[in-house]
Image (tube, coloured by chain):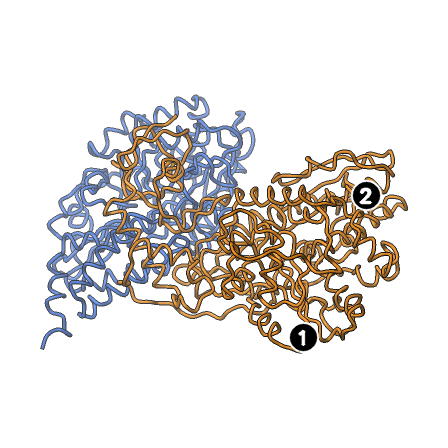
Amino acid sequence: MIHCRINNIDVVAEEGTTILEAARKFNINIPTLCHYPDLHINSDCRICVVEIDGWRGLKTSCSTPIKDGMVIKTNSPKVLNARKTITELILSNHDANCTACVRNMSCELQGLAKLLGIDENRFENVLERRPLDLLNPSLARNPNRCIKCGRCVDVCASVQGMHVLERMGRGHNMDIAPAFFQPLDDTFCTFCGQCANVCPVGAITERDNTDQVWTKLHDPTKHVLVQIAPAVRVSIGEEVGYKKGLISNGKLVSAMKHLGFNHVYDTNFTADLTIMEEGTELIHRIQTGGVLPLMTSCCPGWINMAEQEYPEVLPHISSCKSPQQMFGALAKTYYADKIGMDPDDIFVVSVMPCTAKKYEATREEFKADGRNSDVDVVITTRELGKMFRQMGIDFDKIEEQDFDNPFGITTGAAALFGATGGVTEAALRTVYEIVNNKPLEDIVFKDVRGLKGIKEATVELGGQPIKVAVSHSLANARELMEDVVAGTSPYTFIEIMACPGGCIGGGGQPYGTDNKMREERIESTYIVDGNMVYRKSHDNPSIQALYKEYLEKPNSHLAHELLHTTYAARNL
Amino acid sequence: MIERKELTKRFGVIDPLSIEDYINHDGYEMLKQAITMTPEAIREEVRLSRITGRGGAGFPTAIKMNSFAAEKGEKFIVCNADEGEPGNFKDRYLMEQDPHQIIEGMLISALATGATYGYIYIRGEYRKAIAIMKEAVTEARLYNMLGTHILGSSFTFDIEVRRGAGAYVCGEEFALIESLEGKAGRTRVKPPYPAQRGMFQHPTLINNVETFCNLPFILRIGGAEYAKIGSEYASGTKLISLSGNVRNKGLYEVPYGRTIREVIETLGGGTNTGRPIKMVQLGGACGAIIPDELLDMDIDNERFEMFDSKMGAGAIIVIDDSHDLFDIILRNMEFFAHESCGKCTPCREGHIQLVRLVRKFVDRVATMDDYISLKSLADVIHETTLCGLGQTSPTSILSTMEFFHEDYLDRIQNNKEVRP
């Protein structure tokens, strides 16, 4: 153990502990800016500097390990002056028009400036305006707000293995951008949005579509539906500052109705449907010697990566549309027929934890009625939170309502989709019972749960042990792809989610997502599963009814037409 | 005699492209001797010599070497020949005039530490030096000074010459390593230091050209004898790049302990204009600017600590009284604003603000507030930047605020905007 003193407090911590970690352990707050939990320490911003007796210069607390006998001051006049000067310098090259920024009041730079008491800037603003990148439907990049903290560069490279964002140029003209300043849609960017999630300011954000939603909600000629993804409900409470734990489905439905949606549906319903279709596809491929391993298709970030970088693996990917797109297709066909409405007048909004879903909804192949996009607008958890705040919804007081029918009943299996391993667990609950023709005794598949990068499990199907793998974050997907491309993958089924932790850690989730929050959201997901009446997708009576009255059976001709899709290699 | 030619003794005597010539002038003798010594014995000689790094920071070479030697696995040696500091040209001479001396120094370092591969990273503009070093490496391989079973022993070491792409910051050790790895030249956070995790995460010993050149000399006369050369503060000789308003510009090798004035007056022959010396910048653009009164100081790092500076890599730039102090500082700051890699905030955003503030002094529109801002910003950049570039870049401002305080006050008092 190392003994040192920070601000006259005796601090004891293990060897290798940084000054920042040691200080936090003893409730001493050192402000930071580029530092982010679970990412690398790059010490670029220099905000967290401290003074160490006998050491030359100020040292960054995030990167300096404590040593025996160190005497550290975190708030000396010299330190405060340095922090203030550095913050002024950042602001001198920043588009600080705060009221015209999506991050107003949630901006880490703004918070820092307030904390340090910056009321005027000694340095002239030298910002040279650069063009915005608004060329894709998912992410907006505003280099004028970028403070070059490097978080997005690190998350893109080390968590996602993409290396799309880099430091370009040097000196005062350094920008963080894709190589050669290409727009994001001309790169391998998957639109996963992890960069937007970690950005401390408004330099990379989701494309905001809330105005479009408001417009349609107030258009009397439109029938406006909304679907809510499973991962949204375990995080929306954080976004709106709800203190009492999880916001119940009932309150959420009610709040959506307050916003003005005609009907509120649950993407969990089409998650159950995905399990029926994908499970059947898996069984079919196993039994007929089809292409294996079968890989999941619900994550649009992963699909983007596969189409752009791994065209060889496309035959492995399930032909099932994602739950979002299955819902959209049903809404504009089955549902439109059922209520006797022209699909032109039905407007489908989805609330997703994800920025890549915005791109997915614009894909040409997702027009089940031949004219309209199946999903008209996608908003993220953060955008939904914004709409709730604009509406002034008080989750303490709001009453409970049920999801609307005909997609009202869902299962615990569907709820699992939000967490890494969830699709696998849901699929196994169904596939096991169908293939083995006996009830599954323990429906919890522990091996596929948790935040380990690549997880494996073995399950008996029809007397055969089959191996499944689960990966989350694209760097881990890359690892699995090597074997798949080489044809040596030992697995029968692979679940791939682009974001760390799965959708609960999606790029559209509340800011400040770290592994601790991911774990909490995952825990909430399992609580939701445990509370459900039905825990297996094939037990869902609404699903059974849908097949009976409309789709006939999983992988039927009509199911293929509405619920399945194709993939194509995309050259940049 | 002020000069003592040890590292430069073969300059003009041998054909740099002839390994035979080098061998005929004691060349590779110390490699032969080192092969018969234990690594510990070599390092002990280095320790006894008290030698410090010649690249500018003046870190004790033996400490770096010992911590590198303690590391396991595949290890690299890098020769930092990215001599980019304005006013310095000693490494260029060493490479162009006596390339095998560098190779021999690297070989001795490898024997002392267990490294098996080396790189010489040369400033991109040094085309002649690059061609000569490449030729020398090729010839050394032919003579079995590089490769496997060197001189019949079990020692294996080879060298690759790499060319820089023109960034000043690549002279900083981690930026250089990033560049060697094929990335943009931007430094890394320390610790870990290169000796622990450097090139491709392997332990890497990175030294300046002149430091490596000293190793054969240390072994030849012995560490204890070497330690006697120079002053109580620094041992050995130092290559001085003398330039500016001086009659005899050029490279000189002098033992530590000589004064700056001796170098300028005796070797340099005084100013070439006949005008008095206004100031002398030491080390290069990142060095202190001192007035005539301080020229009787020794050429060594410890003496310079008193104004928180270093002698640097050994440049002495003489500036006579026809030059404006603030013009000089402005040029320096524009240089650093251009050369900052942009990674850390104070360097990226700070230098452009320093340029703006210094320009006010040049334009005679500066106020006391500007002076205070300039001082505070220069201090913060010096204290908080990630690498040596920003830690040393404000030295010309901070040193002149101390030694040329009246010049600042004069500009503020004679502000042309404030006067009626």
Q: Residue at x 87, y 33 (%)?
A: A463
Spot occupied by residue A504 in the image (x, y as percentages of width and height): 60, 49
Q: Sequence order check: which comes first, mark 2 or mark 1?
A: 1
Figure label count:
2
Is residue A533 found left or right of A22 in the rendered image? right
Q: Would you name the residue on which mark 1 appears?
A: A222
The residue singled out by tag 2 in the image is: A431
Q: Position of residue A223 (x, y in %)?
A: 68, 72
10 Å crowding of disc 2: few (<14), some (14-19), many (20+): many
Query: What kind of residue is marked 2?
Result: Val
Of B286 and A217, which appears nearest the observer?
A: A217
Callout 2–callout 1 Cβ contact below 8 Å: no
Classify B189 as above or below A120: above
Instruction: Please state which of residues A36 and B356 is positioned toward the viewer in this rendering.
Output: A36
Q: Colour of chain B?
A: blue
Colour in which chain A is shown?
A: orange
* Relative to B350, residue B41 above or below: above
